[in-house]
Amino acid sequence: MNTWTDELLDKRRMLADPLADEAVAAIVAEKGPEEAGRLFNLLITNIDLPLDELAAPVKDYLTATNQLSANTDWEQIRLANDLFIDHGPKFLLFLYHKSLPLLYLNARGAVVLEKTSRLMHQGADVSIFTRRVAETGQFLLDVMAPGHLEARGKGIRAIQKVRLIHASIRHFMPSGQWDTNELGLPINQEDLAQTLMTFGISPVDTLAQFGLTEPDERLWAYVYTWNRIGELLGINADLLPADLDEARALLQTILDRQAASSSAGNSLANALIQFSKNVLPTDIERVSELLITQMIGREYATKLGVNTNTGCLGSLLPEFIRAYFNWGEKLEDKLDGPLNIVIQQLAQRTTQAMVNYFDKYKGRNFTIPASLQKAWHIEGRK
């Protein structure tokens, strides 16, 4: 029996994150709207969490959220880190071509992503959205690098920052631009749960799409780790799956409820494709559309307005990628030393390209932790 009924998930759409919301409300009450607005801008424009600039109510929130739960199984975290070391470049590729498109399918959830991007920046240029795409990849690396989820680690700070940004968005969303009865609260519990599943179960299942097999023990360790991240993001315990099958069921249940065509989803998907074309080098024309279609399926891709008219190349590309992935994995099992040329070229090129991505708004480059650069044989910034 499906644990996540329509009744439960409808209720969760009306629930957000009381702890973070109270922290932002406390700033407004103590310092006034201008100080709360300054906090929001600091969170958006700073690379790291600006601890020295935060008011006392937020410092209390930071103290309450500065580590994973006390009952965390750190052996599971270690296994997840090992899996990420083995497949991280592929997971980054999957993020841009499966995880984010699955999020944009949530027609009601996509509205808040589009509106908040426009709230943070004037104008409607596609670069508004592409910057968010890059930031999402940075978050993935920040939380999954070995050691980053230890108390007050870089991953913990990244989680705390995202959670406060969510609360700030809810506070600053103009009431006239948001229909709570229709959409639920901005960044509500159901939408957060879907996001968590696209980061957790989605990438490990995509490995299997390309013929890469891993023991369930390692796959579950990865989903378990994202459950712990979800707790720290303020997601309710009843939306955290207990095993791989539950994780798959939760994601599919939410998609069945929320997947629909929308102008917001189409805009975000188009920005994602433009980001890939501009930042991620490839010799294959329309590779982003082809990868999205392959990874989420033609029906979902069509809902996002993705051009799924793939022609002959569309039938050949999946086999090409599958062969590339399997070739690299088999060689990796047999040979010692780096296999820079043959292991997952598309994923490798994606990750290498991100090193040179520069965010003009924040004045910083995309950063891959040194330990991961070494493990993935990624060269430094050029």
Image (cartoon, rainbow, N blue to C red):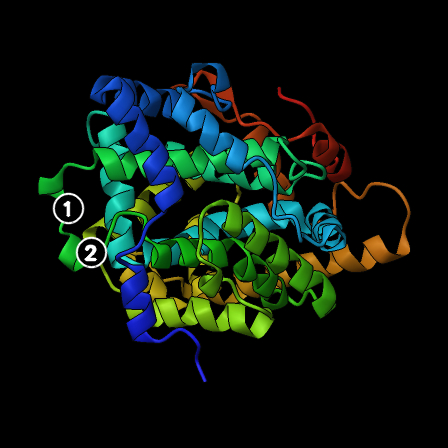
User: In the rendered view of the protein, which quadrant contains the N terminus?
Assistant: bottom left
Q: Is residue 152 left or right of residue 313?
A: right
Label ID, residue 183? 2
Above or below: residue 299 compared with residue 233: below
Q: Is residue 279 visible?
A: no
Q: Amino acid at mark 1?
A: Trp
Residue toward you, 166 or 287: 166
Residue at disc 1, secondary structure = loop
Q: Which residue, given by chain and number where applicable, does mark 1 sit on?
A: 178
Query: Number of labelled discs?
Result: 2
Which quarter of the picture shows residue 254?
Answer: bottom left
**Residue ranking furthest to the left:** 176
Q: Position of residue 234 (x, y in %)?
A: 44, 48
Above or below: residue 71 compared with residue 373: below
Q: Residues within 10 Å of mark 1 (few under 14, many from 20)?
A: some
Label ID, residue 212? none
Q: Image point 44% across, 66% down: which residue?
A: 251
Q: Amino acid at mark 2?
A: Leu
Q: Image point 63% across, 45% down: which residue?
A: 89
Q: Position of residue 102 (x, y in %)?
A: 40, 58
Q: Is residue 275 visible?
A: yes
Residue toward you, 80 or 382: 80
Q: Position of residue 82 (x, y in %)?
A: 75, 49
The Cα–Cα distance between marks 1 and 2, rounded to whole angstroms, is 8 Å
Which quarter of the picture shows residue 157?
Answer: top right
